[in-house]
Amino acid sequence: MSSDFEAYEQDFGTLTAEITNKIGRIPKLAGEEKTQLVLNVDKQLEEVRELMEQMDLEVREIPIQSRAMYNSRLKSYKQEMEKLEKDFKRSRIAYSDEVRNELLGDDGSSSETQRAHLLDNTERLERSSRRLEAGYQIAVETEQVGQEILANLHSDREKIQRSRDRLRETDANLGKSSRILTGMLRRIIQNRILVFILGAIILLTIVLAIYFNLRGH
């Protein structure tokens, strides 16, 4: 999984370098050439967004113990992406103002006012986007914590089940040992009774032998 992420990183570096170069060229061009460059940058930014989505999916598949490092790298790439989008919006705003001035003949003061409004709206949109991104990140982290808790609960359940099995086995062994000891004790008592009876018979025999011997004399 990490090798795929690193491959995406290389693609990200190549694309962002090209986009940065093209964004810097937009204000210096004019006419159809500038229009085509704007469209090309817009297309490449969409490719970067898709690439970021793939990187995000790859990070989710990385083991938890290694995920923090990749999350940090992904976060820095997202910040770089935001900066690129901001620079591109500013270059497009400048490009739109230039085209509008050429078509409508607006004066410089009006253009600057409109640009200020556009920049203000852009900043608001970016703040909203950052808040949404932060909410999404919190949701992802919450999901990860939930998965870890479920995994721990499953592990604890297996441990408890194994402990119960061992207790049942121990209880069965104790029952068997108890039955064996009971049998042994019963046999000991029976043997002692037999010994007592045999002793009594022998003693009685000796007494009778002595009695009849004395009576014969």
Image (cartoon, rainbow, N blue to C red):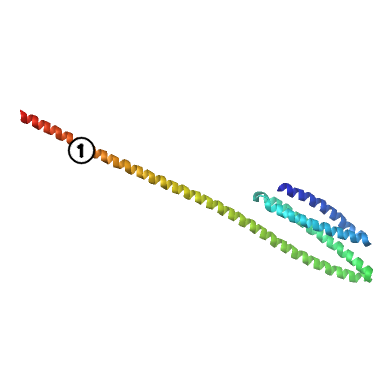
**Spot occupied by residue 125 in the image (x, y as percentages of width and height):** 77, 66
| Res 146 seen here | yes
Q: Residue furthest left?
A: 217
Q: Nearer the viewer, residue 25 or 206?
A: 206
The part of the image, by quadrant, that contains residue 82 is bottom right
Please count the marks in the image: 1
Q: Which residue is painted at 30% across and 42% down in the image?
A: 185
The residue sitting at 88% across, 66% down in the picture is 96
Residue, x 67% and y 58% (percent of image)? 140
Residue type highlighted by circle 1: Ile
* Left or right of 20 in this view: 200: left
Question: In this image, 160 relative to 8: left or right?
Answer: left
- Tell me: 72 left or right of 156: right
Percent across and percent down for residue 102 are 94, 68
Observer-nearest residue: 86 or 103?
A: 103
Q: Is residue 166 above or below residue 137?
A: above
Name the secondary structure under disc 1. helix
Measuring from the top left, give residue 200's x and y in whole percent: 18, 37
Instruction: Write down the residue under mark 1.
Output: 197
Q: Give 48 or 127, whichever is nearer the viewer.
A: 48
Could you tell me if residue 30 is visible in this image? no
Asked where in the image residue 112 lies, by quadrant, the reply is bottom right
> Where is residue 182 shown, x and y percent of the image?
32, 44
Is residue 95 found left or right of 202 in the rendered image? right
Q: Residues within 10 Å of mark 1 (few under 14, many from 20)?
A: few
Quadrant position of the C terminus in the picture: top left
